[in-house]
Image (cartoon, grey):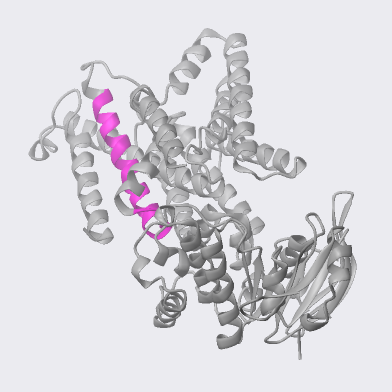
Amino acid sequence: MRKKYKILLMFVILIIFFLMNVFFGNSIILPMEIFHSDTVTEIFFRIRLPRALLALITGSVLAISGAVFQSLFRNPIASPFTLGTASGASLGATLYIVSPISFSILGFSLITIFSFTGAILSIAVIYMISLFLRSFKDNTMILTGVVINFFFASIILLLQYTTDPENVFKITRWTMGGLDVIGYTPIINTSIFFILGSIIIYNYRNELNLLSIGDELSISRGVEINKVKKVLFVVTSLMIGSVVAFTGPIGFVGIIAPHIASAFVGKNYKYLLIASSLTGSAMLLICDFISKVILSPAELPVGIITAIIGGPFFIWVIIRENSKN
Amino acid sequence: MNLISIENILVRLGNKTIISEMSFDINSGEYFSIIGPNGAGKSTLLKSMCKIIDHTSGNIIISGSNIRSVPQKELAKQITYVTQTPILNDYSVHDFIMFSRYPYFSSFSSITAEDKRKVKESMEITDLLAFSERKLRTLSGGERQRVNIASALAQDTKIILFDEPGTFLDPFYDKQISTLIADINKNIGITVVNVTHNINNALLYSDRIAALKNSELKFLENTAEVRTDQISDLYDTDFIEIMHPVSNKRMIIKR
């Protein structure tokens, strides 16, 4: 099947998962029932629809970021989580939760700004350590990311240990990852970064192809690698920060989605970015659907579902890559 | 006519001097070989010419422009580099070669008819048309090195730098690649700068040979004027000259 048809098929699957997510949950809301009563209308438009839209945006952001990182680090397990970007954003959000301050700047709540800062800080630390070591070898940066993950996780635990019980609950719940938002503020805030970021990254599709092969080859083909890498790091960090501020860390989507997408459309970033975006969204929508119905009427945080599915997949990716080499 | 001028270039990486104050010119259309023992600075010199490594001081002038002031994308229309390591990944041969058209891509435009023509032509020259949709990972070492060369050809440059292209190849593929490089130089007129350990290949195909040792230029001679004692000094090993019994060409081999 041609790649364009495969992408169309992925888009259809995404629509189906989106509709499943908005119409099915603790209770089923059929399309003709949406306007039957104010309560149903309220549930549909204030809870179900924003949640599904947030899943769509978040899944896409994590998958696109994963695809970008897998190219930049030439490592199949690079993702916002293995590199510490998401844990940087999480630390930022945790600092916000435990701090007494609360206000917004230009319509963005402080938690978003804290998350941004954390995400960019973590990628800056990795970048500076690699500069210091004069090594941009994939493994150096991945290992630095793993260390940063542990370091930030320890600070989050320290903050949790020293703060009051109400904040402990908030942090615990938040670090499990969830999509339960009310209203459209998170959607507006995240979609700005999602749309702009996606357009910028897609414009770098040719550079991503070359960078995924090697730095020397990229330079000899005309890529200004330092400039391109900086732009891509900053853009992906901002995108990740914007979603993690609302959802908490949702693991494994960023690793898994690009691999599923490449199995369908191949490695060329012209198609891979679009396919990863659709796969990430579809994955998070279906995981969120499972989290809503598996223990109904109770709900599981979606991060638990993605981790349960993602863990074994992660190992499969490592085994597959080893067997290739 | 000088296509490349190396003027007093010095390359330092950290505290180590890799290239020490070196000057020479390379002519347009020339087959120029660089030989020398391991660690002499040959690959660094090659990488400096296409800005993979920044030189510390001195000038590298290509087509009259100092490469420091030429944007990378513009430089990539003049000069490209073929690594010694055959590329190993999951891209198709066609896609990989098309990526080399990068200097001619703009962000919003799609692939042009000229891009497609150039990729097809490069695959024809390197006899790769039948491999178009094969993944690079499934090819043999020699086939992958041909893909590397096709990818450099698709970039449509005046100069191709080869960094020991036969290193990992068996004698069959080594000969195939050597002949291909010579053809590219002779028939298409591309200036070839070839770093090699194969002295006899250098003698067979080159117009001139430069020898590097301990970060310095030891000699630069027309190929016919390279002497056995110069090679012996270069490698600290005794070499002798013989005539090939079949081709009747001059060869320099270890005693």
x then y, percent, for residue A126: 66, 38
Say if B24 sits above or below A279 in the image.
below
- Name the residue located 49 percent from the left edge and 69 percent from the top edge: B107
The picture places residue A108, in percent across and down from the top left corner, at: 52, 41
Number of on-image labels: 0
**Extreme residue toward the left, this view:** A32
Magenta stretch encompasses residue B38? no
User: What is the residue that sits farthest to the front in this orientation?
Assistant: B245
- Left or right: A57 as drawn, with respect to B66: left
Location of residue A255 by image quarter: top left
Q: Which residues are magenta?
A: A266-291
* A56 vs B211: above or below: above
Q: Residue at x 70, y 84 (%)?
A: B30
Which SS type dominates the magenta stretch? helix
If the image is split into quadrants, where does the N terminus of chain B sit?
A: bottom right
- A140 left or right, relative to A249: right
Q: Residue furthest bottom?
A: B1
Q: Is residue A279 magenta?
A: yes
Instruction: Quadrant for residue B23, please give it.
Output: bottom right
Which quarter of the rendering shows the C terminus of chain B? bottom right
Is residue B8 among the parts visible in the rendering? no
For this view, does A28 lie left or right of residue B158?
A: left
Q: Which of the two residues, A289 or B194, is positioned nearer the viewer here?
A: B194
Q: Nearer the viewer, residue A90 or A125?
A: A125
Residue A74 in the image, given as x and y percentages of width and height: 53, 46
* Residue at screen point 64% across, 33% down: A144
| Residue A299 visible in this rendered orientation of the protein | yes
* Relative to B94, residue A216 above or below: above
